[in-house]
Amino acid sequence: MIRFIHLADVHLGAVPDRGCPWSHEREEEIWDTFRRVIAGIRKNPVDLLFIAGDLFHRQPLPGELEEVNSLFASIPDTRVFLMAGSHDYIRKESFYRDFRWESNVTFFRGETPECVEIPEKNVFVYGMSYEHPEISEPVYNSMRPQQKPGFHVLLAHGGDESHIPMDFAALTKAGFDYLALGYYHSPQIIMRDRALYAGALEPTDSNDTGEHGFIEGEYEQGILKTRLVPFACRSYQNLVLTVREESSQYSLEEMLRNDIMKRGGKNMYRIVIRGRRSPETRFLGERLKNMGNIVEVLDESRPSYDLEELRRKYRGTLIGDYIEYFRQKEDSVVEKKALYHGLQALLDAAVFTGDRKK
């Protein structure tokens, strides 16, 4: 049996949410999580470790390469296969070019695809690295595994039109047993147990919601089994707060405080306020941001106006015409948002100028 770990998009050196109080903690946590993966391999060795691009968030420095290499040296019985991706691509002056890796590490050094064989395990690993931030040619689609029995793995990074488009069905049909994919930060099963995006090891921005970790796999006698192992130390979460007409700033803050306690104070949150509030109530998003690791506050709540009553009350005025205009429009989310925002501004102006109808 062959056991392996497949990870991707580690982004060492990234500083998520730069400028936020927790950003430098996140920078170190990305390194720590990668170290924890290696420590886990030391305790429970695997045969192969695949890293499908963007190990670094940008061009690696010599000291960073030495640090990673020493970690790989601590798992000498594991063969490591590593490629440069679209973020840490091999520039002309890249320190990747002349770096000497440990004997258990295979680094694909250029954009010409190659195959590395491990004869004693009947394993064949195919790969290449990025030497440019974008590659629009479908390089992988022309690759074919050798006509030899064994475990044939394609290590690949990309999948959209600017980063090596891929025909996954054709590649598996061509004879690759496993496509170890990187580039997209959310774990994705393209073909069950055959083609998987590992996703980012740690989430690096607020769009990286959901579980993050690595793929663990076993291959034996032509049968492959894989599973996602959640491993990130914290996550980005969307948190919806539903308000009512009687809701106040205080009650909203209490609701948020309780939800964060239930979900975990270390996580990062995008707050979305929804529901119908009193027209006189204004929620202060900046105060909510001080209550935890809040990356964004979106107020999608609506004032609880009686539109028909307001239309009758302000007939023949700008406010009445405004309401009438939107009555004839498509009842979409965008139109409703424009209606309520504009109406609130007009009513506030009417109060300010003393032009409000009795």
Image (cartoon, rainbow, N blue to C red):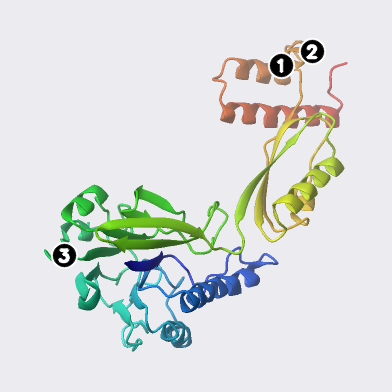
Which residue has dot 3 on it? 149
Sort mark 3 into few (<14), some (14-19) or many (20+) by Cα contacts within 10 Å: few
Q: Identify the secondary structure beneath mark 1.
A: helix
Q: 268 or 60: nearer the eye?
A: 268
- The numbered mark, 1 or 3, whose residue comes first in the sequence reads 3
Quadrant where the image shows the N terminus: bottom left
Residue 220 lies in what quarter of the image? bottom left
Going by the numbered disc 1, the residue's amino acid type is Gly
**Residue 143 picture location, percent across and down:** 17, 61
**Residue 150 picture location, percent across and down:** 20, 66
Label 3 and label 2: CA atoms lie apart by: 82 Å
**Residue 287 picture location, percent across and down:** 80, 52
- The numbered mark, 3 or 2, whose residue comes first in the sequence reads 3
Going by the numbered disc 3, the residue's amino acid type is Pro
Please tell me the numbered disc located at residue 313. 2
Tell me: residue 71, above or below residue 151.
below
Going by the numbered disc 2, the residue's amino acid type is Lys
Tell me whether the residue at label 2 lies in contact with that at label 1, contact meaning CB atoms closer than 8 angstroms. yes
Query: Is 297 left, or right, of 333 in this rendering?
Result: right
* Residue 335 in sight from this viewpoint: yes
